[in-house]
Image (cartoon, coloured by chain):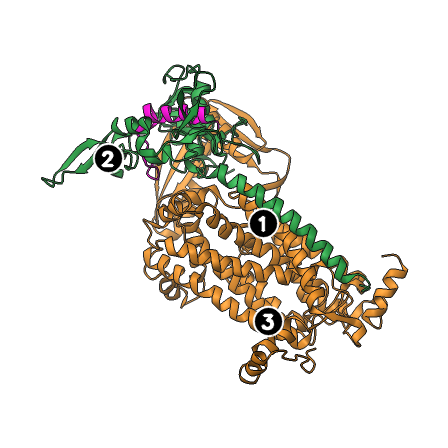
Chain colours: A orange, B green
Amino acid sequence: MSGPSTYEPKSGFTRWLDKRLPILRLSYDSFVAYPTPRNLNYWWTFGAVLSLCLVSQIVTGIVIAMHYVPHVSMALDSVQRFKRDVPFGWLIQPMHAVGASMFFVAVYIHMLRGLYYGSYKAPREVLWILGCVIYLLMVGTAFFGYTLPWGQMSFWGATVITNLIGAVPIIGESIHQWLMGGFAIDDPTLNRFFSLHYLLPFVIAGVVGLHIWALHEAGQNNPTGVDPKTKEDTVPFTPHATLKDAFGVSLFLIMFAVFVFYLPEALGSADNNIPANPAQTPPEITPEWYLRPFYAILRAIDFDIGPIKAKLAGVILMFGAIAILFVLPWLDTSKVRSMRYRPAARQFFILFVLAAVGLGWCGSKSPGFSIITAGPYQATVSWIENGSVTREAITSPSPDATPAAMAAAEAAARQRGATSVFVQREGGVNASLIAISGGTPRERTLSAPKSEELDAQINAAKATVGAAAPYVSIKRQTPFVFSVTQLAQMLTAYYFLFFLVILPLLGLRETPGRVPDTIAKSVVAGEAQGA
Amino acid sequence: MMRRWIIALGAVCALGATAAFAASEAEKPPEQHFSFEGPFGRYDMGAVQRGFAVYRQVCSNCHSMNHLSYDDLAQEGAPFAAYRVRNEETHAEDVRLGLPPGAHGQYVNINDNPYIQSIAHGVQISDIDPDSGQPTDRPGRISDHFRKPFPNEAAARAANGGALPPDLSEIVLARAGGANYVHALMTGYTGEQRNGKYVNRYFPGNLISMPPPLSDGVVTFDDGTANSLDQEAKDVATFLQWAADPHMVERKSLGLKVIIFLIVLTGLLYLSYKQVWRGVKH
């Protein structure tokens, strides 16, 4: 999209500089004359928002790093001292912590915009992949950053995530120890995480440079997905896009400020203000909201898939969920870029957004949390009151003969008139038998809305009948439970289905709406319809 | 016919195991409507001062507040900051404590603040005697951090039946529910005791090692406020909120200015954007 340069140096100095370092020419061509499609909507302002977020995170981060102490016994104290005693520390620390969340709000909108309007399709594949690289680096940076205060969530989050690497067969354990810098999460881990947290933002800044370069080579996509054809279709970047971006950024900053000044703790976890304690696991280990969808995918796999263990399968899917974005340009077969003209794809896209939000919710709940419980938890407790109890040891000649000996002993006991018999194997050739004869059989049915409450009732029942009958039989009836894990499994399936099946097949089968010939036409047509 | 039997641990054992009653979940702390809530909330400095009295007389026997020093209590905007206020009738200058920032009154230099001096002098701080190099106790100075009740974690656990009293500097930020939770915990004791622990409706697991710290009349308030349990709990929760977030008032008032500025800026940017795009169909 960058045509021949239209920059004309005005003064003697700029002419002199232009011959030696055409940096003003580059800036002019990139940020002033750069032709921008005239029909961009507000979803296109998030690129500017993201640039601002990156600068804000780097600037506040550098200041915090001047006061931060990367040591397990001083890290949390140093963060708290920064907030209390350093001038404007109370402002800079929440700007950085809330800023991470805001960065992800903006990046998710930016990515979904790209997904909806097909901004990943030719000739923008490399632009999209660079964006995915930036996102991956952001995830890493955010994770390392979250561990730095060394609160409970920092420590346990670091434990959970580094443990994942241990799921890799054969070499996993060695890599795990290499990452931690020892045999447990400790000072060496914190030091390397701090080092990486300081490094990666500058790597991000570098890749952002490439991202913008690729953008300016291919030109911006636009809501119609039609390439600009004439000068009619575009306007110069400055002042048109700059002012619109500035307006969007300013709106975004209002939301940012509301969180920084009035809700600085709202997006964080109270547990992370408790100093890290390797001896005490917090009741819930959850990452920050922006990583919860992936955390839900990780935990959704609670079963082995063939030879692949559940843990490894979860890790593969979690990383797969990001990796799949890299190949998206080749998965979507549709010739039409914008979903504005793909009514069927639009429905699936909305479902995809809902699935991602749903996965985020699943990631915040404990996996066993029941969403729907069809009926109460029930248990039948039966015992025999005032029976006479006899105990007997069984010995068989060989381990193979033990089951037969146990069955024979049980039959013999029943013949002697025992109403209940319990046989338990205690080793290769040994077993024990407990027979209860006489007495009155009793039964009690318990019912509770929750599994833990039923356990409490069973324990209570055992305690009350305990003296009369030392042996109690319990039959549980667990109702059908739709748990968070099951929901996460369904949503995970949809996540992958969307990329691997729906987008490839839909592009071949759907009938897209009529796409306008040019951007200018779409603008005029839109006006005619009064849109 | 084989029936599956589950052996209970034995009658006596089962009867004795009262702990087998599954711990019910902690109740949600009720809302207290504190002075510092909401976008324009300020600290009720009287409550913060009374809450400090509760901390000093009760909590500080077991709980440290390592991030606070005595002079923090008397910085501008803090609960024991002294201000000279001219009495319009007598034309005498009164000294008032804990005015909100911007109130009419002249801030008294912290070194001339008699209240904070007497609070600091009233404690014994463990230190190293500079002459002998041996551990010694000396009267506190305003630059000292709050006195630690125990020299180390082992001593704290030994004195508290194995439990470690947490540091209270940031406790309202470190507990879900914040100040409401602190108030609820103080008032949530049922009076029962199990296995040497105390039943508290709001504590996770319901069994807490801390004996009920507050009750009606435990603390005497200088300002004559009725010293009911509820009042003490509310005041100490307010104090702990201030201790965890001493810059809240400053933050909220700057926030208001920033947001008003941003709204005006956004309006101007919108108008310029409309101006530039006027005549450009899009």
User: Foreground residue, A415 or B133?
Assistant: B133
Instruction: Determine whether label 1 and label 3 are within 8 Å by CB.
Output: no
Q: Is residue B275 left or right of residue A66?
A: right
Tag 3 subunit: A
> CA gap, disc 3 to disc 2?
58 Å
Q: Which amino acid does the dot numbered 2 rest on?
A: Ala
Q: Is residue A108 visible?
A: yes
For image coordinates 66% across by 79% down, the residue present is A7
* Identity of the residue furthest to the bottom in this view: A19
Mark number displayed over residue B155: 2
For image coordinates 60% across by 78% down, the residue present is A11
Write down the residue under mark 1. A256
User: Foreground residue, B33 or B202?
Assistant: B33
Q: Which amino acid does the dot numbered 1 rest on?
A: Phe
Write down the residue under mark 3. A211
For image coordinates 32% across by 38% down, the residue present is B66
> CA gap, disc 1 to disc 3?
25 Å
Q: Where A109 sits versus B192, above or below?
A: below
* Identity of the residue furthest to the right in this view: A528
Q: Nearer the viewer, mark 3 or mark 2?
A: 3
Q: Nearer the viewer, mark 1 or mark 3?
A: 1
* Identity of the residue furthest to the left in this view: B132
Q: Which amino acid does the dot numbered 3 rest on?
A: His
Report the span colored magenta: B44-70
- Residue B117 at what x, y percent from top left? 29, 29
Residue B278 magenta-highlighted? no
